């Protein structure tokens, strides 16, 4: 049931979310979005110089496209295919980081913590609205990013 969304340079450069909207909006209209938990992958075909040493998440135009996506669908991490690395790549698009040959991606710790807490609050609200149990899902996303949330943390989040 995995879905692949392909982006090209023109869509990225024009901040065109239509490749995502054509997939997501019908699912939202039919209340089917929750069936696509961790099912979406991206293929990013962004033209750049073959000598360009940057990772795709270091290209400002691509990052800006993902910032727009995150503003439009702030709950989007829910549908990303975590197992294929989509969550890590998505976070890299939104959180300052550096790449190290031996250690891999190193996020700015404070920025990552702020990003994670924002997503916890957004997803808690969104999951609750869709009658899905948020606690285990939120704990999993935090663990994927290297954080352990204590059970007591969830006592402070007001359910709506």
Image (cartoon, rainbow, N blue to C red):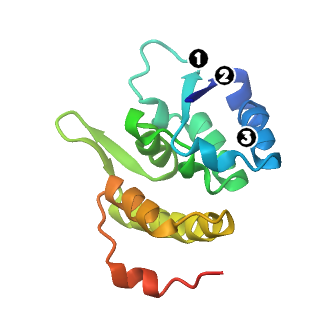
Q: Which residue is mark 1?
A: 47
Q: Quadrant of the C terminus?
A: bottom right
In the rendered image of this protein, does residue 56 appear above or below residue 152? above
Q: Quadrant of the N terminus?
A: top right
Give the alpha-carbon distance from disc 2 to disc 1, as whole Å: 6 Å
Relative image position of residue 139 (x, y in whole percent) = 38, 64
Give the alpha-carbon distance from disc 2 to disc 3, as whole Å: 21 Å
Q: Pick the residue in front: 19 or 36.
A: 36
> Which quadrant holds residue 101?
top left
| SS type, badge 2 | helix
| SS type, badge 3 | helix
> Which quadrant holds residue 149?
bottom left
Mark 2 touches mark 1? (CB < 8 Å)? yes
Q: Pick the residue in front: 107 or 31.
A: 31
Q: Which residue is mark 3?
A: 24
Q: Report the mark closest to the observer, 1 or 3.
A: 3
Relative image position of residue 122 (x, y in whole percent) = 60, 67
> Which quadrant holds residue 79?
top right
Relative image position of residue 123 (x, y in whole percent) = 57, 64
Q: Which residue is mark 2?
A: 9
What mark, if any, has residue 68 been given in the picture? none
In the rendered image of this protein, does residue 20 appear above or below residue 52? below
Q: Is residue 111 visible?
A: no
């Amino acid at each position: 049931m995995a879905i692949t969304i392909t982006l090209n340079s023109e869509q990225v450069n024009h901040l065109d979310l239509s490749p995502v909207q054509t997939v997501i909006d019908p699912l939202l209209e039919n209340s089917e979005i929750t069936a696509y938990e961790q099912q979406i992958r991206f293929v990013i075909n962004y033209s750049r110089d073959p000598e360009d040493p940057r990772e795709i998440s270091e290209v400002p135009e691509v990052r800006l496209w993902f910032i727009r996506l995150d503003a439009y669908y702030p709950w989007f991490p829910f549908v990303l295919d975590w197992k294929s690395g989509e969550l890590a790549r998505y976070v890299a698009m939104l959180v300052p980081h550096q790449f190290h040959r031996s250690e891999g991606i190193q996020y700015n710790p404070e920025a990552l913590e702020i990003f994670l807490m924002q997503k916890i609050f957004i997803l808690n609200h969104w999951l609750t609205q869709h009658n899905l149990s948020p606690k285990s899902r939120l704990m999993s996303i935090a663990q994927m990013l290297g954080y352990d949330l204590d059970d007591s943390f969830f006592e402070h989040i007001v359910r709506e």
